[in-house]
Image (spheres, rainbow, N blue to C red):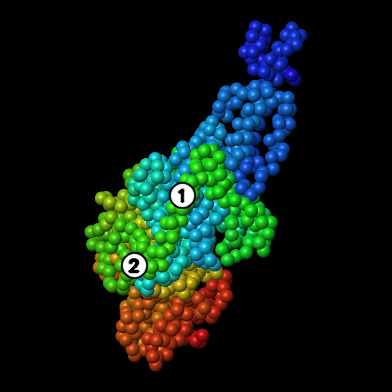
Amino acid sequence: MGAVAAGLDPAYLEALYEQWKTDPGSLDVSWQMFFQGFDLASCDRSCVAAEQARDQSRVASLIYNYRDQGHRIARTNPLHEPDLTLTDLELSSFGFEDSDLERVFDTGHLGGPQRAPLREIVEILRRTYCGSVGVEYLQIQDVGIRRWLQEQMEPGLNRARLTREERLQILELLIDAELFETFIQGRYLGQKRFSLEGAESLIPLLHWIVDNAPDAGIEEIVIGMAHRGRLNVLANLLDKSYSTIFSEFEDNYLTGSVAGDADVKYHKGFGSVHVSHRDGRPVHLGLTANPSHLEVVDPVVLGRVRAKQRQRGDMAERVKVVPVLVHGDAAFAGQGIVAECFNLSRLDGYWVGGSIHVVVNNQIGFTTLPGEARSSLYATDVAKIVEAPIFHVNGDDPEAVVHVADLALRYRQEFRRDVVIDLLCYRRHGHQEIDEPGFTQPGMYREIREHPTVRRLYTHRLLDDGVLSPEEAEATTARFQSRLEQALDQARTSGEPEPAEPAYEALWEGLDEPYSDATIESGVAHERLVTVARALTEVPEGFSLNPKVARHLPARREAVEQRGEVDWTLAEGLCFGSLLLEGTPVRLSGQDSARGTFSQRHAIWHDSETEALHVPLNALPGAPARFCVYNSPLSEASVLGFDYGYSLSEPRMLVLWEAQFGDFANGAQVIIDQFLVAAQAKWQRGSGLVMLLPHGYEGQGPEHSNAYLERYLAACASDNIQVCNPSTPAQLFHVLRRQVLRPFRRPLVLMTPKSLLRHPRVRSPVGDLIGGRFDEVLDDPSPPEQPERLVLCSGKLYYDLIEGREAAHSAAALVRVEQLYPFPEPKLADALARHAAAGEIVWAQEEPRNRGAWSYVEPRLRSMLPGRTLRYAGRPASASPATGSLHRHREEQDAVVKQALGEGEER
């Protein structure tokens, strides 16, 4: 024994010594060894306890290091045995030698016996943290959560305790998963299916979560995943019929049997009611459709879950609807939207109570190995930004897999936080079944070809354990093979698949009509507008509102009460409030949306003294719906994806996403291209999402001028979206109300203003809100008696043209195209007919010629104007959206106005 520690109770040491003399066996081995030959009289009696405390501290460090580093030598990789020589876990690193293995120490919070020999402590730690499961959880700062995880893992040695029936069910699921893939491979050789082979344990993993969901209080699970394994999950978890899937391989859908253009089979979504194998209780499952852009579905799923939680009254606990996100290892590490979604996970406007993440870790991307794909040790390291526990598990040990599935499910429900399962497996074929992986990974794929499937490994395990007889294994396999053969016969003989669950749920009843341009009367009674205006302008008693905000309130109230004029922001607030009074909730999110990028909205008031919050629209008396407004993180892709997902599941709410500036939507282009504009055609999924994109040239430079209107117009077809550029507050009021009053849902892309928010001409009479509707085309309210030219325009430029016309006393008529898609040809034709005497027709825009609406409207206008001249007035084509010089901007803008009015050179 070594140095002496201060503060030892000598009486305690003497009592131990007397006990040893009377009964040596009553003390642990370390004390017995010490007292042999010990001369109490010649020793400072504090030395024994000091050395004992020091050694116990070393044991505690050993336990901590296994909890922290044990995953590094865990047997989690089915293709390779781990290197068991990790210096940080060697006994010598803690000052112990092999001779210390029989010494007895306190086991602390390790579980099991309170005291045990060092050898047994090490064995417990290795079985717990270095077997088929490796765990990373010490990044969690909450000690209570760490203790909970330790209690779940350490007493049971981090293994499942399964009944015979549960083990046989796992085998049956593995048989289903493997034979489904090999059956398709044999019947449809060369067709893409992105098989699950090598990762078949995913099916029992998901089944365990789903079957135990009712016990955990879960009523619905929304699943998001990429294409690998999707067909297997559809068939063997969501119960999509095999014959339907085979029909898709046969490509025998009859004309008209699928709405829209459809998509490849491994991108489609599906919904079903799953009956738990455990107790027969139902849980609704929804697999969200997803393109090949992999992780882009993640925020869409989260948004869907948030909406469904609201519908089920689960906004406080968020335990009834749970997201399960299935990822690939390369995408999980490589796609930034994964980190964006983790960043959303605990924010008030986007919290869903945590997701269960399952990383199907094939240990390879397309042809890219981990060392080329990431800089971190694990693909899952990104999850540590939210302190998510990470369970690395060997996919060849399905019992360990269902164990961590159970643990992850209980963790999510207990703490409402994200949790990650890293399912270590492999990909038996190439990225797709016609690809040859041996070109790039010859050694890896030699090993995979020789590696038995998880089904065979688990079958032998159950045979060895006496759980299963060879005859039972063969019979189970034969039964499933027969089911597949019958399903194939049905697919080939019937010519049509079985009908799938309708894409629209009951909540969509009455909202799935085809697009129609039928007029929607969207006016609101004056009394109701006054009610809203009073709520928007009434400061609660004792609330210290910022004077700059307060000074505008009386004039706004008076404007509505006296049927005066309203500006853009007041019209928006009146629209939102009128919808709330009618029972339509409103959700608005985006960067700085609560105040408004341009300090125009002030949807949330902040008490100047106490910083208390007040939301005026939620003070509406008797309103059955609420207004939800959230400042989003500085992210476009994840937030737009989230709000799009929300709109999928909540069609009776006005859901709006606002960009800080319109071009910021660039960061969400994949969401726009793959979901917003294409989902109706690909997956028959409607959405009523509104995108608010501030747009207009005020000399603020290339990044704050253009919302890239041309991109949305280029994506328009088949009535897939609506693109509008309203120029008056009343038009905004009506187009937003029209969005929820129509018997169908289509995304609405709105070019919204910046400078027009306070422009003195941008006012609408309250009477225009009381009566009327959204007008796709606005004729000139005060045209010249004999217009010499007709200028067509859209949005902000109209007001520049008005001022230019007045200054030059021009005889040009101005007609605004407020809706660009669907193109309002009949209404525009009426306007053209009213100005038939105009000698020239001009399309004027402030965007460069290769941007804005010109390329879109030109062919349409020419077809409407046979024999009449059509000219372009605007900036010349440019690689950059706008100049960065305010002086040059003003020169350009003046030139555009003059060209449009016939005073400048035509371009």
> Considering depth in this image, is 894 or 907 the residue closer to the camera?
907
Q: Residues within 10 Å of mark 2 (few under 14, many from 20)?
A: many
> Which amino acid lies under the numbered mark 2 shown in the image of this protein?
Val
Residue 379, position in %: x, y?
60, 51
Position of residue 449 relative to residue 515, above or below, is above
Residue pointed to by mark 2: 735
Which comes sooner in the sequence, label 1 or label 2?
1
The outermost residue toward the right is: 42
Residue 457, position in %: x, y?
57, 46
Position of residue 28 relative to residue 650, above or below, is above
The outermost residue toward the front is: 471
Residue 431, position in %: x, y?
58, 61
Q: Which residue is depicted at the point 74% across and 19% down? A: 1
Name which quarter of the figure residue 400 lies in.
Answer: top right
> Considering depth in this image, is 543 or 422 the residue closer to the camera?
422
Name which quarter of the figure residue 831 lies in.
Answer: bottom left
Q: Which residue is depicted at the point 56% across and 63% down? A: 432
Q: Which residue is depicted at the point 59% across and 41% down? A: 132
Residue pointed to by mark 1: 475
Q: Is residue 142 at least partly visible in the picture?
A: no
> Considering depth in this image, is 541 or 110 the residue closer to the camera?
110
Q: Is residue 465 at least partly visible in the picture?
A: yes
